[in-house]
Image (cartoon, helix red, strand yellow):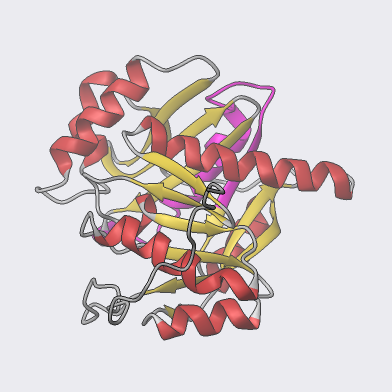
Amino acid sequence: MDGGERELAVEAALEAERQFVLTLGGFALEVAGAKLVTHEKIPAPRFNFVQELGVGRERQTAFFERALDHYFQRALRPTFRVPLPAAAHVDRGLRRFGFRPRDAPLTLLLEDGRRPTIDPGATVVREANPSEVERVASFWSDERERPELRTALDVAWNHPNPHEQLVPLLATVDKEVVAAAIVYRHRAAAGIHFVATRPSSRGRGAASALVLHALRERPVGPATFLSIYADSERLGLRLGRLGFAPARSFLEYELPRSAELAIPAPGPPGPPRWRPPRQPP
């Protein structure tokens, strides 16, 4: 695809990711300069992030306070995704509020049309059965969050809205389920999410087999393009060998665990800065 098509594909992939959070029970609030993706019942950063779209230097303080107030009122710790190269004033503003960039950027990759002939070995990938929703949810949630995620997955999986489809995948080795992923489509854009492997089974190619299955079998429809995220250079290189190419990168800012969820006090009250016009006598 050319530059214009690639840009449209990136925007469609980002929108599909937001819709993925929404279909699992979250919501998105759009304000000047960003989109705030929120899930009040699942406090993980994967469900609570600010997608920065462009904040002016003179408006950044009000923007950050508004965005942080939105999450802090809900006792949520968001991450901020800032497209690279990050604007210097945005970086300073986030650091002033206690946020720090992660070591590696977050990269959105799009499939590049290649179909690698990689042997999955002994790993067998299949679509999960509706009766396995508990097993599927167990890969990405602890006991406290699992009921909410299980219910959300069940609804989106078995009762999708128009223009969307969600398909969980399971990878098995010797009939034991060792890895899982979700493929979600919104309109023409599909993403591979939540690729996870049991700790005892890592390094055996199960995650790669899940991604290859999604590329080859197109479980959410043949007329889609696929995207996936990489949060490390090593993962990006591995996905490159599987048929993906980097499309856009973000610097992710997060709060240290010791940071308090509070907005600095605005200072002593002062007179109003604006008064309504008065009618002439």
Residue 177 to residue 77: above or below:
above
Residue 207 in percent (x, y) is at 44, 51
Which residue is at the front of the view, 39 or 280?
280
Residue 6 in percent (x, y) is at 79, 46
- Residue occupying image coordinates x 58% and y 27%: 217
Which residue is at the front of the view, 31 or 17?
31
Residue 141 to residue 272: above or below:
above
Examine the image and state in which quarter residue 190 appears: top right
In this rendering, would 112 be left or right of 83? right
How many labels were placed on the picture?
A: 0
Q: Is residue 116 visible?
A: no
Which residue is at the front of the view, 141 or 195?
141
Residue 254 in percent (x, y) is at 39, 73
Q: Is residue 184 visible?
A: yes
Q: Is residue 217 magenta?
A: yes
Residue interval drawn in magenta: 199-228
Which residue is at the front of the view, 16 or 241?
16
Residue 256 to residue 275: above or below:
below
